[in-house]
Amino acid sequence: MSQIQGRTYANIFGLVERFINAKVLELGRDHALGDQEAVEALVRFSDEELKHQALFRRVEAMVGEVLPDGYRFDIDPDAVARVVLGKCTWAVLVLTLDIELFTQAHYRQSIDPDAELSELYKDVFLYHWKEECQHAILDELELARHDATLMAEERERAVDEFIELVAAVDGILKAQSAADAGYFVVNCGRAVGADEARSIEAAFLAAYRWQYIDSGARHPHFAKVLSGLITESQDQRIQAALATLH
């Protein structure tokens, strides 16, 4: 099960870094004829995200060579990116900050202390973690810069769009949980009844919701950043939306 989750983990990162890179390139244009240090930082950010996408494609290929046939990750990164980038910049940056913070939490809490994990896998995510720490800082700076340009009614709509993005991410997680659970049931080496199969799928979904949404949204720094930008009622709406995932 952990091998399946690890394979999906690499695929999910390859997916989200597609839209993150596109947004970073867009933000870089705001600085192109001004702050050249900001331009350089965002160009390096973009270059590292392109590198990460290539890295995770290699991880997927390597894992695919040794795990049984039948694994599926049918989510189109470009299609997802178009949906995400159709939302306002504020919502995309808040989602990106969530992702970059949960990346750090995962490495410290789960990957680094696991003595039985593949050394290569740990090495990949060590360097991914180091670069994502820098990306989170840049994302927070760009979020603060962009937020300062918004009127109250624009921020209100942006909160709604962030909630819509969370729901869209959850839809992806539901689909992949079903695919991963089905693959596990076929390959676990014993017969699995219908009730147990449903329980396994629920376990995958609970794990993925924590990994890809909650562990970032519940991160202390995420709460600190967001509380400085939104009203109490807006925060309550976000928390209510997150609560529906449970």
Image (cartoon, helix red, strand yellow):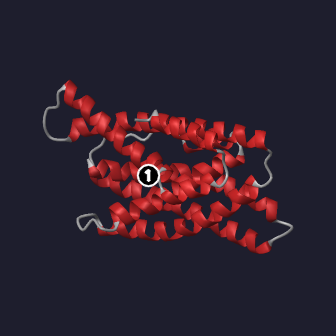
Camera-side residue of 38 and 219: 219
Q: Residue at x 54, y 56 (%)?
A: 222
Instruction: Locate residue 204 relative to residue 96 in the image: left or right.
Output: left
Quarter residue 97 falls in: bottom right
Residue furthest to the bottom in view is 37
Q: Residues within 10 Å of mark 1 (few under 14, many from 20)?
A: many
Question: In the rendering, at what x and y percent does residue 41 appear?
Answer: 68, 70
Quarter of the image containing the C terminus? Answer: top left
Q: Is residue 121 visible?
A: no
Instruction: Locate residue 130 relative to residue 80 in the image: left or right.
Output: left
Position above or below: 68 against 57? above
How many numbered discs sit on the rendered protein?
Answer: 1
What type is the residue that disc 1 sits on? Answer: Ser
Q: Is residue 68 visible?
A: yes
Mark 1 secondary-structure assignment: helix
Q: Residue at x 29, y 52 (%)?
A: 3
Position above or below: 141 against 186? below
Question: In the rendering, at what x and y percent does residue 26 appear?
Answer: 74, 55
Camera-side residue of 205 and 1: 205
Residue furthest to the right in view is 33
Mark 1 — residue? 215
Instruction: Locate residue 204 relative to residue 12 in the image: left or right.
Output: left
Question: In the rendering, at what x and y percent does residue 75 appear?
Answer: 49, 39
Camera-side residue of 221 and 41: 221
Q: Residue at x 62, y 44 (%)?
A: 232
Position above or below: 178 against 225? above
Instruction: Locate residue 89 relative to residue 36 in the image: left or right.
Output: left
